[in-house]
Amino acid sequence: MLTDLPNVLTLSRIGAIPLLVLLAALRAPLPDFLAALVFTLAGITDYLDGYLARERQQLSDLGRMLDPIADKLLVGATLMALVGFGRLPEYGLYPAIVIMLREILVSGLREYLAGVRVGLPVTKLAKWKTGVQMVALGLLLLGSDGARVMGLGFLPMGWIGGTLLWLAAALTLITGWDYLTAGLRHAGVSADA
């Protein structure tokens, strides 16, 4: 089960994190480009592992457990690296905090609801949030220096990535609230209380 291709792809997302952080720490054009490339490839595995698991009928409890963990580790490590290495635009810390808090909230809700045997399905808006968030983080890792490696140095990657990060944070608040109210309903608590 651990060697099924979908699970290998999920584990590769976790394995990519140290390389991504190392490349981001180097703060040079080629490493910035490579950090963004590693992040993008890791993001693609997020789509592929689920697709292949369904296509090959290799759905497993291990995969269902590892997939959201790998996602949260990748996003959390990337956000911390961007903050720690001063790679966020001005005021970029605030959407990063919102995104991290939502990830912790949803993880806690999922854990609680699993204990009472209730699933918390991913909504379409949450998928959009993830897409916007992944593009934002990839662009922030790339930065202007990495963009020059691609011949795109004329684009303000920090501004574009920062703007998308704020959009992801807004979507994060909406989807986080949706998940929280769903969790509270199953806990027998009114969201208005």
Image (spheres, helix red, strand yellow):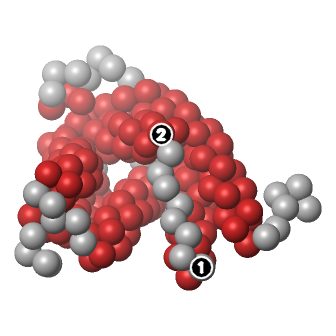
The residue located at (54%, 76%) in the rendering is 117
For the residue pair 148 and 175, the one nearer the viewer reads as 175
- For label 1, count other residues whose C-alpha is less than 10 Å away and answer few (under 14), some (14-19) or many (20+): few
Question: Which x, y percent locates residue 16?
Answer: 20, 63
Question: Is residue 137 toward the left or the right of residue 105 in the image?
Answer: left
Left or right position of 89 against 37 = right
- Give whichever of 36, 133 is nearer the camera: 133
Name the residue tied to disc 2.
124
What is the CA distance from the residue labelled 1 to the residue labelled 2? Answer: 24 Å
Residue at x 32% of width, y 41% of height: 138
Q: Secondary structure at mark 1?
A: loop
Q: Please determine whether, in this image, residue 100 is positioned above or below residue 91.
A: below
Residue to which mark 1 is pinned: 116
Dot 1 amino acid type = Val
Callout 2 amino acid: Lys
Image marks 1 and 2: residues in contact by CB distance under 8 Å: no
**Which residue is at a point 65% across and 43% down the rendered structure image?**
174
Instruction: Report which quarter residue 112 is drawn in.
Output: bottom right
> How many labels were placed on the picture?
2
Quarter holding the N terminus is: bottom left
Can I make out residue 71 in this image? Answer: yes
* Towards the viewer: 175 or 74: 175
Return the x and y of residue 21 as percentages of the image width and height. 28, 62
Q: Which mark is residue 71?
A: none
In the image, residue 62 above or below residue 50: below
Seen as rendered, the residue at the extreme bottom is 115
> Which image quarter: residue 26?
bottom left
Q: In what element is the residue under mark 2? A: helix
Residue at figure coordinates x 9%, y 64% from the top left: 5
